[in-house]
Image (cartoon, rainbow, N blue to C red):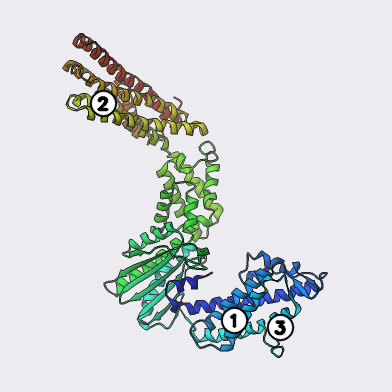
Amino acid sequence: MLKDKVVETLGQSSLLLPAWIKAALLANDRLKLYLTMLQSAAQHANSPELPIQDWGRDLAQVSLHDSEWLQTLVKSAYFEDQTLIIPQLNQLLNALATDLSIMARPICDSGRECQPELVDQRESWLQKLHAMEDDEGIDRAMIADLTHGNRKAGHSFHILVMDLHKQLNAMANEIATENLNGAHVWQIEDADRALILAFMRGLHRTSPLKFSHPGLDTAATRDGDRLLIQNDIGTNDVHVLVVEVEQRTVSLTYSDLHTGRFDFFRQMLEEVGFEWTVLTPVTSKGLNASKPYIVGKARFKAEDDDFLKDSLEALASRIVFVIDWNRARKRLQNFVRKHQAISLLRRAAKEEWGHMAWLLAGGERLVFNAMQTVDSEAFRVGDRLDEVLGDAPATEFLSELMRISSVMLRQQQPVALLADEARMLLARMLRQRTFEFDLVAEHAAYCHALALTLCDALENGNSVDDAQSASRVLQAKTLERRADHLLMDARQRAERQSRWACVVYLLEKSDDVADALEEACFTQSMVLQAPLPVLPAPVKEVISRLADTTLAAIQDQVRAIEIARHVSDLSDPGETELFLQTLWRMLRAERICDDLSRQARVTIVRSLHDSPVGLLLASDLVATIEKASDSMLAVGYALRKLVLNKTGISA
């Protein structure tokens, strides 16, 4: 952890000393363990037949959980003449040098008065450790110089560690911190207490939402006219927040390695009145693997002391929602798109549910298990939740699941019970599923737009120029292609899930309507081409009536789909009757169109018998519109079948 280094980079050195002392004391524990293990390695090399101590508990106590090289250091060591061969020597030397530097830092580098001999001994040992990096082992004399504690035998590495430890304890007593509602504070004024307490009030309001995750440790001190507050957000070394309060103005410096999480936090604070300045990405040696990270500054100027305390409380209450934010976003993107995942996290923060409970309860496994057990026909391996339920229902399900997870885990309910809740919630969502109707409705909307384009062209076609006519044809072609893409989407779904077969059949018939209407728009544009005569009024009138009737049928289709998406059973006679009336009105339109097409043909023959090309084009236009109306009949019956299947009644 390099939190203290980040604080130093952000320019708030007054907050460093307690953090340095804390890190130094931890380094002391690690150094003593390294030296003990080195002595044990030498003993094992001398007597390989003796049992080897299990170091797991000792390593865990100093937070060295993942240091596999230390687990094998003792048993892999052996003597070659007077030299102890250690395969992990470079790692050991680096650990000794690193922790010696950390341990000596508050004593030798904080600007406080320091014993010169301690500085000299630190530098001497750092040089010795560096000089040994090319060696394969450590001779017996150097092992003694590293590990002995007898002052009469001269200065050793171990004695230096003991002397530094003594100085650290004295220094810790000098700057003993006060615990103010969980914040470690020192050298503050009485007026600062109310501000720190306001900050901690907001922190404590939402901090339970992180559960057992580390983070949110707070330190505060005064530096001249400024009150400084640092919050240790999480486990990443560059994820740090430092707050300055001076003359009713809150200034915040925030660093983050994730752009998305930075923007998320920035927007949360903008909602409570903070104004941001985002700096260019920063690169600092030794931090974030020397990769750039983002630093931003925010500012809030309060009108009075109450506003000042409210701003600090609001600020602190938002911090918990960036802990493990990126992990939650990635997990949610298994089920919805990125912008929807971020929207879910934003709502979870606004409602103060948080996302950690969902992650702790299993996160994506909780959802995948529910998908597998609720309906094996609805969900197949590789299916996304939003592809089955639709964008809005999938988002609603995940949002409710995050809320339930937060409530139940805070009540210490078992995760198994939460898994049952997830399955029940998903089952309810499936019963209310209308995604198929979303696709059907979108296709019908394109058909409706095509019919409107045709009707407008028939009514106002004579008043437009060639460029406007060509633009209208292009518009119709674009609408038809978009409708066709919906059909292709449904076919892909049907390849994986048989329940989409009815939707595909309906969309195929509806796509015939779109194709015919697009062709009709093109044919109508040909009628306007010179030197063809303008359509006689009787011909134009009857063709317009045919197109208007087709448009009315499509409008009824749109209405029927909207009614159908809410029909879950036949228990509501009024809803069912309205659907059937709309559907049959749509079907009757086909008969009306048949009569109108015959009238149109008769009128065309009578009016255009002396213009063979005009007669041909007008007849083609009528036939194409009639084809659209005929396809509407098939659409109506396919919609009826889809709805009856949804209600569980055989068509």
Secondary structure type for disc 1: helix
| Rendered location of residue 623, percent (x, y) | 30, 16
| Residue 454 disc label | 2
The tag earlier along the polypeptide, 1 or 2, is 1
Amino acid type shown at disc 1: Glu
User: Could you tell me residue 505's position as x and y percent?
Assistant: 43, 26
The mark nearer the N terminus, 3 or 1, is: 1
Q: Is residue 439 above or below residue 36?
A: above
Q: Residue at x 41, y 67 (%)?
A: 254
Q: Nearer the viewer, mark 1 or mark 2?
A: 1
Residue pushed farthest bottom?
152
Residue 123's tag is 1
User: Could you tell me the amino acid type at mark 2?
Assistant: Leu
Q: Secondary structure at mark 2?
A: helix
Q: Residues within 10 Å of mark 1 (few under 14, many from 20)?
A: few
Image location of residue 95, percent across then percent down: 63, 72
The answer to whether mark 1 and mark 2 are in CB contact below 8 A is no
Nearest-to-viewer mark from 3 and 2: 3
Residue displayed at 55% across by 49% down: 365
* Quarter-of-image position of residue 536: top left
